[in-house]
Amino acid sequence: MRIGLDVGSTTLKCVVLDENDKIVYKSYERHYSQIAYRAALMLKKISELLPSQRKSSLAIAGSAGMGLAEGCGLPFVQEVFATRVAVEKLLPSTDVVIELGGEDAKILFLDSSMEMRMNGSCAGGTGAFIDQMATLLKLELAELDQLAGQYDKLYTIASRCGVFAKSDIQPLLNQGAKKSDIAASIFAAVVNQTVAGLAQGRKMEGNILYLGGPLSFLPNLRESFDRILAVKGLCPENSLYFVAIGAALMTDEKKFDLLQLVNTLENYQANEGYDFCSPLFNSDEEYQAFLLRHAAGSVECAEDYNYNGGVYLGVDAGSTTVKAVVIDENKRILFKRYQSNSGNPVPIIKDFLNDFYALYPAVKVKAAAVTGYGEDIIRKAFAVDFGIVETVAHFTAARHFCPEVDFIIDIGGQDIKCFKIKDGVIDNIFLNEACSSGCGSFLQTFAGAWDYDIADFAKLGLFAPKPVDLGSRCTVFMNSSVKQAQKDGATIQNISAGLSISVIKNAIYKVIRATGPEELGEHIVVQGGTFLNDAVLRAFEQEIGRNVIRPNIAGLMGAFGAALYACQYGKGQSSLLTAEQLSSFTHEVQGTVCKLCANHCRLTINKFDNGRVYIGGNRCEKPVFTDHDNEKPEYNLYSYKTQILDSYHPVSGKRGKIGIPMGLNMYELYPFWFTLLTKLGFEVVKSPHSSHALYLSGVHTISSDMVCYPAKLLHGHIEWLMKKQVDAIFYPCMTYNLDEHLGDNHYNCPVVAYYPEVLAANVPRLASEVKFIYDYVSLNNEKVFTKRMHQVLNREFGSFKLSEVKQAVKDAYAEYHSYMEAVRQKGEEYIKMAEEENLPIIILAGRPYHLDREVNHGIDKLICQIGAVVISEDAVSHKIGRFPLKVLNQWTYHARLYAAARYVVESKNPQLNLVQLVSFGCGVDAVTTDETRRILEEGGRIYTQIKIDEISNLGAVKIRLRSLFAALKQSQMEVNADE
Amino acid sequence: MSKELQDYTILVPDMCHIHFSLLKNLFAGFGYNLEVLTNQSRAVVDEGLMHVHNDTCYPALLVIGQMIDALKSGKYDLDKTALMITQTGGGCRASNYIHLLRKALQKAGYGQIPVFSINASGLEKGEAFKLSFQRIRKAFAVMTYGDMLMLLSNQTEPYESEGGATQQLVLDWIEHLDVELKANRGFSLPQVRNNLKTMAANFAALPLQKIRKIKVGIVGEIYVKYSSLGNNNLEKFLKEQGCEVMVPGLLGFIYYCVDNRLEDIRLYGGTWLKKFAITKIMNKLLCFEKAIMEAVKPYGQFTSPLPFYKMKALAKDIIGYGVKMGEGWLLTAEMLELTEHGYENIVCAQPFGCLPNHIVGRGMIRKIRSLYPGSNIVPIDYDPGATKVNQENRIKLMLALAKEVMEKKEPVEMPYCVPDIVHEQVV
């Protein structure tokens, strides 16, 4: 008899094989982190069921079983290897195995050139991810799967990690998109992530096998794989047990006495060898004193049903919860609600209002305000007077509790928001970047995995003696840190406390990036639902070494702030729907594709009674305006640059067709290369504007899934060009950029410099089907370049005269300079115009390739909609000479960035500000963001950073930009008041 | 580095232990008191996280964290302590380490501590340690010794009959070289050749067991490749798993840095004189690797590294020589060299999100495998959040495959054993 145990991140699987390798016993269960205990139970059961087989050989597989195997002296088998052994035995004709586990994704190619791949340190697109998404949608996994079978259309959802995906899904929910469409989109995202992460240039074809929990339990996930890969895969019998079977097959001769083993396992005390922090509370007295102190920050809640004065409504339609309060003239809370957002905030607010009107028939609603992700839809649905940005709402509320507040930190379901207040004005805003949010939903996910609700789960940690030190990282990494801690024997109490502490560390060191409490402030107000957990609050106070104020309505602060705002700015009569109007309230959702421009946004149209309409999913205002002739003119240098680049039309030539992939540095050098190659007699074919579909078409050849999105897009551009049957694709490697004499050197970043090498090595057809020219060139020395280009062209095409190349090169340089000059002049013009009309100007600073709409997600347009003029960094950088920096200034594009920041500081125009676009995965920006921030802040300016990736959700970006404008407006008002 | 620093304690981060131990002695010979930092507790990472942008590469975070942790330890007189790091220059963000270090020191309240960089790229003009020709030559000799000791001990230790004998021999040699270097001997090429020959003889004389081991090579970003702090004790883990580990030496990296200048001239132009001068220097430097190969040659059991230009030639059809940021084409070439030498199981160690490695590491694996189907490469990311269990699990997958291949192969000839020669004293 042979036993195979597979200890996964969440489940324990066991298989017993007899002498003929027939399965005589199998079991599958969640282990809730009690690995040794559950394994012992399982073996005990086996020994009872098969009493004649007391002695058996045994092997353990699975990453979470590694510690157990080592500790108990049992053989360990790597799980992917075990899978292969099982597949070769049971289904030897298999070509490709796709196995998704709790936190791992694996692909095995079993043909002649065998390869086994596991996802890297990123757990995106695995079972944990699907679990997280189901929780977000308030669905059981089976329901999620069932819904996914009924979809009409797919949305783009990033699946790199749950946090990313959430920021894609939340707005869809808030806009009223159908759950079935979202469910199917989630599955599609998992497929794309698996392919993007693991295919690496290999085609998945032939006999495909689906293994592991998610693929066994979710038929529609298999369906998604089948559809996207255009295959028909098989999910075999025992698909959950292949690792365990493989482990059993790989056991060696050594026999173990089962009862003895049970004994060993029961006594197995994993050494508590993990790093830990000091406990949150040492004694109950300490805890009681803590509770008493925090009882002080409270607002009166009254149930005064006879009240008949004026009231103010505040709603905070957050990402995972909806909060609403009604206050009276004395700012007492008459009625409040804090409810999970099951995807659609509209019915929640409708019920809230109905309940309120029923309890308080005599009141008069004087004003209402709404804030949060669902602001727009709620405002339209219920005719709310004001929509305000969250930061303003929270500040208003915090000031009520602590007039001298100088720092607010709000940890909500999905966001961390921090603001520094200086002289009564929001001075600086920190929002969590899309990838690092370790917020409330993060604790919730872990709580859910162990079958607790969040409050009980957090409570477990209050008196934990040795909280696990999990550091400060995003959820995805946290999963494996927790796994490691489990392996090292941490109890659930210590893990709970550790997670509370890590939420805080994440906020302080990742979001605020503070070095000590003095950087935060003296009067700190904490809020947001997450802080209602005493463990989190305590962890915060411990970490910063200072007591803070937590209002008793910490979870309702956004709504309370909105109500206060309504109270302050209300005009005495609210337009809010009355009880009577509510009785005829209707809400209907339709999906459609906007055809007003090339973006083809997927719109959700929410129709309410009485003709009120809310359209979501739009990237611009076009579908919202009814009168298309009366659009406001847009002052947007990004659009201008795009227009110029699009104005180069191919001219057919005698030398054939040459393709240029439009990505990375081509966004700046296209005028150069187009002119050069056209003059030399080539028809230059430019790949189209990027789109998500284009990205997906090349995703199977991406070799490193952590490289930035702009680079990944190139794989799609290359695929497109190959379809166009060009004679050659031209995309040179460029270590050096043009020297603009702004820095110490003039490099490109490694990815911009050498991405052609990656394409050449990983797009198999590129080598065989088309000439790929990716020589190393530098444009700094015209003479050297001319010679080099002449060499390259003669090698590839023959018969070029040096004089001919010389002239073309000359023209190319001229074209490049005239393009740059045009950009600068237009920039100048816009700045002048904005100054004359007193419009805010945003220098949207990034790299040339941030022009790509698929990369910038229309942020430029969004800024224009808010009413500002958009300039790019290269339009102003030439106005600044070289100046000293605290970093090595060695990249051309980044030197422009520093110069643009300096330009902002030197300009006397308070309306001029810089917003930096940062692509996820851009290592260089770890250096540049801090330095740009320093330049701006030392000059008394606000620094705003926007991190972008594959995601297309503009909700968080909007908050950030609106907060920036609100802060600017407020400081402007202060200045005016001073004068 | 000015004269008055002579009574300072100069802290440097540890990277390759053998080399840095020797460097410490070399600097002592110049009159400087170097201390190689070995603090490795969790506090090192925490200090790094606190003082460096968290998305910065892991090596910067560790090196800076280690230095701040050391300064905080109270072990050093802060008025008499300086910090030193190496800097390679080039388009990778690693060139910014020294600036990040200065920023971090400022933030942590150690703004007064002097910071120096050793570099040969002319960065940090005026402040860097003066690399006079004499000193460069001496440093080169020391690097050569380091590479040789690393090579010999890596190929002997897994098979030694007497536990600890190899390690003892390494220590003996470090001690011996210390005496020589202090006496200003052991730097000239003939002396180096002599020492290398004796080294090879000493190591070849250690009694070995007839056992087979999985041969694993390590390549990667230079810090994470060598530093046990950076790679979670990767070498130790592999040895515990029953592997013989080959780590390509530092000389190759230095040659690569010099050779890049020649490539730059080839690709982007430059004067004839410059080319002549660099070629001349390169040829001088290449004598050192030749010395290693000559010393190793008589002993068939040792795998000698390929001459630099032969290794470079291996990469010709795989990657352009213009890739010169980070480890550039060298990393790809090292994977090829290892594969050719029978170390086809390779761990490619890199900091999470390392930019050059997107190109030269992960980016090239597919192409290498298409040419060498037997190569078994696993890329492993290191960062403060990456856990050992995940890393080791992936390495174990690579090893499982390696083991299977090894068992399928015909039994190969055992390393040549010199029977029971008594361990001779060095020199």
Image: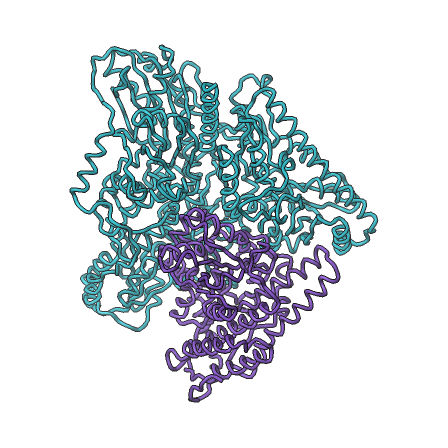
Chain colours: A cyan, B purple
Q: Is residue A611 left or right of residue A459?
A: right
Rendered view: A701 above or below A365: below
Instruction: Count every numbered label the image shows and give the total.
Output: 0
Q: Position of residue A153 (x, y in %)?
A: 47, 34
Rendered view: A214 above or below B78: above
Rendered view: A596 above or below A659: above
Residue A292 falls in which quadrant of the image? top left
Q: Position of residue A325 (x, y in %)?
A: 29, 22
Residue A58 visible, this angle: yes
| Quadrant including the N terminus of chain A | bottom left
Rendered view: A313 above or below A498: above
For this orientation, the residue located farthest to the front is B4
Residue visible at 48% across and 57% down?
Answer: B350
Residue A425 falls in which quadrant of the image? top left
Q: Position of residue B18 (x, y in %)?
A: 46, 70
Q: Is residue A655 left or right of residue B63?
A: right
Q: Position of residue A883 (x, y in %)?
A: 60, 42
Q: Is residue A136 left or right of residue A710?
A: left
Q: Nearer the viewer, residue A931 or B216?
A: A931
Residue A110 visible, this angle: no
Q: Nearer the viewer, residue B131 or B215?
A: B131
Q: Nearer the viewer, residue B1 or A723?
A: B1
